[in-house]
Image (cartoon, rainbow, N blue to C red):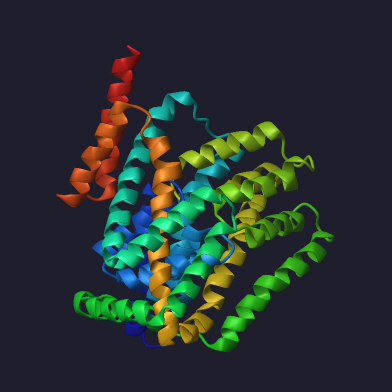
């Protein structure tokens, strides 16, 4: 490799790390909000990808086990800069909250209820971001009445069936509907493709930006599955460290639905076996919900409590590893699969379902937690004006919301 090529690749990797480190420091609000932050950073501002690619990646991440927002970030890094870019994206997005969780495990600090206005102000920013990206993606992927209906039915389905398997079943169902009504949705796919080709500017094409061989894809998938059998055997040799790797890898490999869904598995694995006390578990979980970045860094805290910094590193890598192996390993098969016109029609329906996912996340978990008083509603409205009319970045909104909401809480409390 020549020096200019090496330096160019290094510059891309550093750029990816920097972008994701900013997101790791500012992406409050959980997986749905993370998607909004990613969209604003990489589709709107950086223009690395187009909306169609982004929506398909969201759907793919929801079909696989593991933390969907971290998988999406890993995939973005891989498509932009190969394996170095993927690792840079993961480290940048995960490092801030992981370091804070490790500090909590060592007892370096403690945050009490006086910080609650800060956390709530950041949730208000996340709510506005999710509203913005839901609106933008609905305009892109729900232009026809049939697609709007599919988005609404998807959101309704998630409300009526609050199961970790619901996203997988609904996305597969939408794909089948699209393929069955190929002429209807195939026409919409052609329109969307034409629109994206005109409006994409200098954005990188979708999956064509990084080709992965089928052999490599199979190797990653086999490795992800094989570790489920290998790690329990290694746990017999060193219960203190390998058992941590085994338990957290199994949790990351078998959970659908994100961070909150993995908590019962972690509680059974570590609290019920006496490795972590219930008070330690709940304290770490409370802080993890308030931090930016992935909730799966709760594993960093638990590993640190059980085995210090080495346990924290092992737990963090183990819980993320299966999802990251699978999201890259599936790419060559996804590329071949989506080349069919019939499948393209199915993807149009799936993209409408992604809008339904965002709508559900907005209506069910985000807005009820955000709109707790009239001041919260005013701040969300203000955030929307600043986002839509003046295109303020989220990093500017955060100190503004903290200052205003904290001032209001201080005034009310006397």
Residue 18 in view (yes/no):
no
* Placement of 260 over or under 74, stated as above or below: above
Residue 207 percent coordinates (x, y): 41, 79
Residue 400 in view (yes/no):
yes
The C terminus: image quadrant: top left
Q: Which residue lies at the image location 27% right of the left edge and 66% below the top edge?
A: 143
Q: Which residue lies at the image location 28% right of the left edge and 52% below the top edge?
A: 132
Of 238 and 42, which appears nearest the observer?
42
Residue 283 percent coordinates (x, y): 60, 34
Q: Residue furthest top?
A: 414
* Placement of 43 over or under 369, stated as above or below: below
**Quarter occupied by residue 77:** bottom left
Residue 151 percent coordinates (x, y): 39, 60
Residue 390 as seen in the image, left or right of residue 295: left
**Quarter occupied by residue 169:** bottom right
Of 400 and 240, which appears nearest the observer?
400
Residue 370 percent coordinates (x, y): 38, 36
């Amino acid at each position: 490799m020549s020096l200019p090529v090496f330096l160019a690749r290094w510059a891309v990797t550093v750029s990816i790390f920097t972008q994701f480190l900013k997101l790791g420091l500012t992406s409050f609000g959980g997986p749905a909000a993370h998607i909004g932050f990613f969209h604003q950073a990489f589709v709107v501002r950086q223009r690395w990808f187009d909306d169609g690619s982004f929506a398909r990646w969201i759907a793919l991440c929801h079909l696989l086990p593991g933390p969907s927002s971290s998988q999406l970030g890993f995939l973005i890094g891989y498509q932009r800069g190969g394996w170095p870019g993927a690792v840079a994206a993961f480290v940048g997005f995960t490092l801030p909250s992981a370091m804070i969780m490790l500090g909590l495990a060592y007892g370096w600090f403690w945050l009490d209820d006086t910080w609650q206005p800060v956390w709530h102000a950041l949730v208000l920013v996340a709510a506005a971001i999710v509203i913005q990206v839901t609106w933008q993606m609905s305009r892109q992927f729900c232009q026809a009445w049939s697609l709007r209906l599919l988005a609404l039915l998807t959101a309704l389905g998630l409300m009526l069936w609050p199961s970790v398997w619901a996203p997988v079943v609904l996305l597969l169902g939408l794909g089948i509907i699209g393929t069955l009504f190929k002429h209807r949705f195939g026409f919409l796919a052609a329109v969307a493709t034409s629109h994206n080709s005109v409006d994409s500017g200098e954005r990188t094409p979708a999956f064509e930006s990084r080709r992965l061989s089928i052999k490599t894809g199979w190797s990653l998938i086999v490795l992800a599955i094989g570790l489920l059998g290998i790690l329990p055997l290694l746990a017999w040799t060193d219960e203190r460290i390998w058992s941590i790797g085994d338990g957290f890898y199994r949790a990351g490999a078998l959970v659908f639905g994100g961070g909150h869904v993995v908590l019962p598995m972690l509680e059974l694995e570590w609290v019920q076996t006496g490795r972590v006390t219930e008070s330690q578990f709940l304290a770490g979980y409370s802080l993890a919900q308030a931090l930016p970045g992935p909730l799966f860094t709760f594993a960093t805290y638990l590993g640190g409590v059980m085995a210090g910094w080495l346990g924290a590193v092992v737990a963090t890598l183990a819980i993320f590893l299966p999802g990251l192996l699978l999201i890259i390993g599936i790419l060559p098969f996804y590329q071949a699969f989506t080349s069919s016109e019939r499948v393209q029609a199915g993807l149009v329906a799936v993209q409408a379902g992604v809008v339904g996912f965002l709508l559900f996340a907005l209506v069910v978990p985000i807005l009820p937690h955000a709109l707790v008083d009239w001041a919260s509603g005013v701040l969300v409205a203000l955030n929307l004006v600043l986002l839509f009319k003046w295109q303020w970045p989220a990093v500017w909104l955060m100190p503004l919301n903290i200052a205003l909401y904290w001032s209001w809480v201080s005034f009310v409390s006397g």
